[in-house]
Amino acid sequence: MDLLNTLVDKGLRRELPTREEALAVLATSDDDVLDVVAAAGKVRRRWFGRRVKLNYLVNLKSGLCPEDCSYCSQRLGSQAGILKYSWLKPDEASRAAAAGLAGGAKRVCLVASGRGPTDRDVERVSDTIKAIKDQNEGVEVCACLGLLSDGQAERLRAAGADAYNHNLNTSEGTYGEITTTHTYADRVDTVQKAHAAGLSACSGLIAGMGEADEDLVDVVYALRALDPDSVPVNFLIPFEGTPLAKEWNLTPQRCLRILAMVRFVCPDVEVRIAGGREVHLRTLQPLALHLANSIFLGDYLTSEGQAGKADLDMIADAGFEVENAGEVTLPEHRAAAGGCGTHASAGDTASEGAGCGSHDGAGCGSHAGGGCGSHGGGACGSVPAPSVEAAGAETAGADEAGSRTTGAEAVPAGARTDLVAVRRRGAGTDLAPNA
């Protein structure tokens, strides 16, 4: 296929595809999906070999968020039966992180629900970062605390944070349909604050919220312009009790096409499969490793993930290897830049040679909000006995992309409602974590 040959050539040169080419990837048929995976896999192997980076989420404060993000189980007014608790203490968070590190994780992502941190919250998280780093030599720590105020990114960096996560989530044109309590520009501003402070930027998206192909391309091109080091790709988990509870727009094949498009547009950044991979990719998860070079190990913020051992077995069986602590994740030309590459301003658009490592010496980035690449929403907290609301029935399924639906509609035929479960273990509970 001429399209795929062209995209492979561009990916190996770190050259930006045209929008038409990116849209054409999303429009390929299920019959061609293995060809698409094989092509994008060449680009992935060129820049990351067969290494898979493992990341581990610690939810420092769960639920109780004043924002109205439609996808989030922790949103204002959510009826999802998730764990709700206040801030975890540093030693509690450090113990939670240790489970993921013992399972092979290289990066710990510290997430907290809310619009953004107060200065006192930054102090709490700084103490937690120091506790984790004191006990685990060489560990990477990414903070994901929401919208940042002036000076907060610098304080996190001084405390030892390596990265900051803040997802754009969807296109600027449709952002107002998903969230009304803050703006797309607010999110861009936070990613830029992380960049400016010398933090590695992590910023990604959520697919499956009823968006058009054009919206997916728009947000990925916007991410390329911001030039993060890592791009988490979430697949919507339609939690009961949220406005998008009946939004089932994804099949395993569509998820693979989305990941391939992201890899072609951002060839040399860490592409991470984040929330929803077990729900929507299901038995095709191993194929996704040919596109992404990073995953979360174990559970997510408010939902359970695949068993940690199953993750490790999947990586080995697919012929990949876990990236160890002594290996540098990013390609040499990005890692040598020491972090922040040339990133566009909020009003800029991606252009030939801009962002996502398309230029020699390109930099790095980090994210916040939306849960460190897991769209359950940021949250981490510590209370002696967490308040657990009655578990709501979680639904999960797959259907091809379509228009936005309402909560009154039935779950599509073939939906796997058994694949989504509210997290009841790990941080904020007395039960052992999944790692």
Image (cartoon, rainbow, N blue to C red):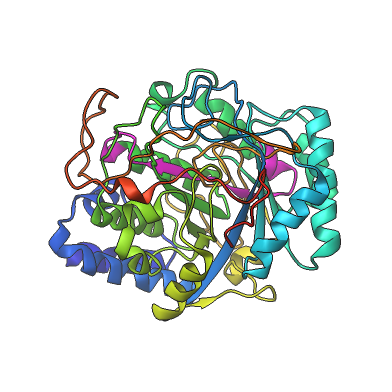
Q: Is residue 236 above or below residue 337?
A: above
* Residue 283 magenta: no
In depth, the one of 55 and 32 nearer the eye is 55
Q: Is the residue 175 above or below the residue 97 in the image?
A: above
Specify whether 120 is left or right of 382: right
**Quadrant location, the C terminus:** bottom right
Residue closest to the eye, 79 or 28: 79
Range of magenta residues: 193-214
Give the quarter of the image for residue 243. Answer: top left
* Front in this rendered view, residue 277 or 62: 62
Number of disc labels: 0
The answer to whether any part of residue 113 appears in the image is yes
* Residue at 37% in and 37% down: 238
Residue 420's spot in the image, x, y percent? 39, 47
Q: Would you say 101 lies left or right of 283 here?
A: right
Q: Position of residue 423 (x, y in %)?
A: 53, 46
Q: Residue at x 85, y 45 (%)?
A: 127
Location of the N terminus (image quadrant): bottom left
How far across and how far down the image is residue 300, in percent? 53, 49
Q: Is residue 51 left or right of residue 290?
A: right
- Name the foreground residue: 128 vs 396: 396
Name the residue rendered at 32%, 57% in the picture: 281
